[in-house]
Amino acid sequence: MTRRIALIGVPLDLGQGRRGVDMGPSAIRYAGLAERLRTLGYEVDDRGDIAVPRAEATDPGDAGAKYLEAICAVAAEVAEAVERAERAGDLVLVLGGDHSLALGVFAGLARVHGRGAAIWLDAHADCNTPGTSVSGNVHGMPLAMALGWSDGFGLAGGPETPWIDEERSAIIGARDLDEAERVRLRASNVAVHTMTEIDRHGMERVVRSAIERAQGAPFVHVSLDLDVVDPQWAPGVGTPVRGGISFREAHLAVELLSEAGVVGSLQIVEVNPILDRENATGELAVELACSALGQRTL
């Protein structure tokens, strides 16, 4: 039976201060995502984009979590779309947009499956809260909120946080953490695989450790922020940080996840065409999505 992919775009840029990631879903589609997935044998149902308000016409609200009310409204729509796709048996693939859209993805998955696991490939931990964030940008908070670390946070329609378990979740490729994040993560049971660990032990060992942690979870969500890749290969991202994983390490990571059968859902975020070179990062996003969903050289 042909598996159907529910492709959901979320052109959200309210969660961060640099404009342009709202065009990420279009850039990834333009790079031929649907066509490439069909060649892998999938049926692709592109459900278009979730409507997102423009920053210029939106009240930013509290400086500690700018645009949080508007982001939560978008996330509620994302959660409903994800829930519908999951209940239909589709494989959810979400295109961003900034990483705050993960709030809706996790909420939708948790409504259907209960508390699950996250494999978070990112230069950043995204584990700030409104009380610890220096910038107030919500794209630096979604993992903390999904883990239940932000008191009182929730979305209309629930469920209550946490939506994922610390013991089953892992961050891969981290190299730019705030001090408050370091303190919280050291005290937690989340596995944080920094670039130093990848350099010392190799990507395969790191990814296999994350897979082992996630085994048996009601759902495993793979979140791929393109800034996990070094800017040499992914120049068009919302928050580039030098010293990231290589082109081949990125492919190896998602290939290992695919081979282990743990890619229950996938999101690709923070592609910024304004900063890109001839859509190189959009094209890389397509290549990595295909590797995560079964493409092999031989």
Image (spheres, rainbow, N blue to C red):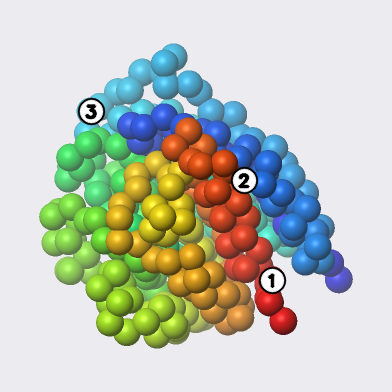
Element type at mark 2: helix
Choose between 87 and 16: the one closer to the eye.
16
Which-is-in-front pick, marks 3 and 1? 1
Q: Does 87 appear above or below 133?
A: below
> Which residue is located at x 30 percent, y 23 percent?
61
Q: Is residue 165 visible?
A: no
Choose between 140 and 69: the one closer to the eye.
140
> Which residue is located at x 31 percent, y 46 percent?
140
Residue 112: percent from the left, percent from the top?
Answer: 59, 59
Give the residue type at disc 3.
Ala
Q: Does 265 appear above or below 32?
A: below
Q: Residue beneath label 3, please?
A: 63
Q: Residue beneath label 1, please?
A: 295
Say which label, 2 or 1, has the lower sequence index.
Answer: 2
Element type at mark 3: loop
Mark 2 and mark 1: Cα distance apart in space = 17 Å
Element type at mark 1: loop
Q: Specify few, some or many for label 2: CA neighbours under 10 Å numbering under 14, 14-19, or 20 or more.
A: many
Q: Specify few, some or many for label 1: CA neighbours under 10 Å numbering under 14, 14-19, or 20 or more.
A: some
> Which residue is located at x 35 percent, y 48 percent?
240
